[in-house]
Amino acid sequence: MTAQGAAAALALLTFALVAGPQTRAQDHRHHDHGAMQSAPATNAASAARSGPVAPVPELTDADREAAFPELSGGMTHASAVNSFILLDRLEIRDADAGTGFAWDAEAWFGSDINRLWLRSFGERIDGVTEGSGLEVLYGRSIAAWWDIVAGVKHDFKPGASRNWATLGVKGLMPGHFELAALAYVAEAGHFGAGIEVEYDLLITNRLILQPLVELGYFGKSDPERGVVVGLQAFEAGLRLRYEFTRQFAPYIGVVHSRALGNTADQLAAEGDDMTKTAVVAGFRAWF
């Protein structure tokens, strides 16, 4: 190669090294600019072709029946027979009148619509039964958490035994207060009513404080049973239990009762106390 040829080749190589990157950068910028210009047009064209997006339609009964054909006939209730047994209170009482023993247990058997309710309750002081009774009721669900009940109640004590026709309601009030309100009718025009309200206050998941209030009324005096017409007594209990398991919980507490109306007047005339307070200890269990 001659000197002129070598010089020309060197000049050509130098030009390629200097001008090449600028040319590629310009080409790249031109390419991006074209893409930016074409993107909006492409998106607009796509939107024009697709049109507005329709909202999701609301579910209809036909949709639900198609998804769940087994419910097409409406909501149904379980027909299986279940049972629940609750020993609500089994306790020893220490009061001014002496040491006593009390119990209150109930059970139900049936479905979530129709049930047979059983209840046994009573109290003994110093070996003497102050009162005891048994209820056998049919319950029919009338709303969520509410049953109307009807049946019979048999009082063993005090005095001579007596049978009562019974009608009332059991259920869960707003705030999770449990309510039982019952009316009783017996022969010879005897009428009575009782109401009981209780509540479980969770201090912890296992430590529970249970207030309970009871009130009784009789529409006719019954001297053989020591009953005076009017309100009988107001009883309030406060029990603190610890659930070692959900099915078993020992407790301690205090129960205070006060005679009312004509009952209080009769006790005062006989020299008996109108108020009674007892310390209690026992356990609660269910199956």
Image (cartoon, helix red, strand yellow):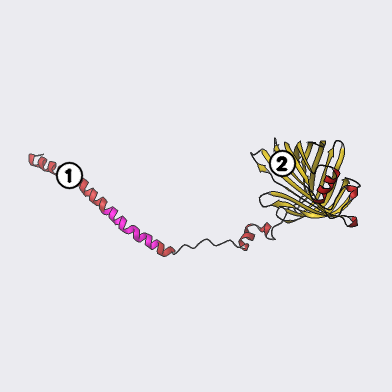
State left or right for residue 231 relative to residue 13.
Answer: right
Residue beneath disc 1: 18
Pointer 2 or 1: first along the chain: 1
User: SS class of the residue under badge 2?
Assistant: strand
Q: Is residue 161 visible?
A: no
The residue lying at 77 percent from left, 49 percent from top is: 215
Secondary structure predominantly adopted by residues drawn in magenta: helix
Q: Which residues are magenta?
A: 30-46
Q: Which residue is mark 2?
A: 238
Decide which of 124, 165 is in the foreground and name it: 124
Q: Which of labels 2 and 1 is toward the front? A: 2
Whether the magenta-drawn stretch holds residue 104 is answered as: no
Q: Amino acid at mark 2?
A: Leu
In screen coordinates, is 13 left or right of 195? left
* Mark 1, secondary structure of its residue: helix
On the picture, is 9 further left or further right than 98? Answer: left
- Identify the residue at horizontal 24%, vertical 48% (top origin): 25
Please name the residue shown 87% across and 36% down the image.
127
Q: Which mark is residue 74?
A: none
The image quadrant where one finds the N terminus is top left
Place of residue 178 in the rendered image (x, y in percent of width and height, measured from the top left): 72, 49
x, y percent for residue 261 = 80, 51
Q: Position of residue 214 (x, y in %)?
A: 76, 47
Amino acid on which disc 1 is placed: Val
Judge by depth and name the residue closer to the eye, 82 or 286.
286
Question: Is 47 above or below relative to 96?
Answer: below
**How crowded is the residue under tag 2: few (<14 C-alpha within 10 Å), some, or many (20+)?**
some
Determine the image quadrant of residue 146.
Answer: bottom right
Depth order, front residue of 15/65: 65
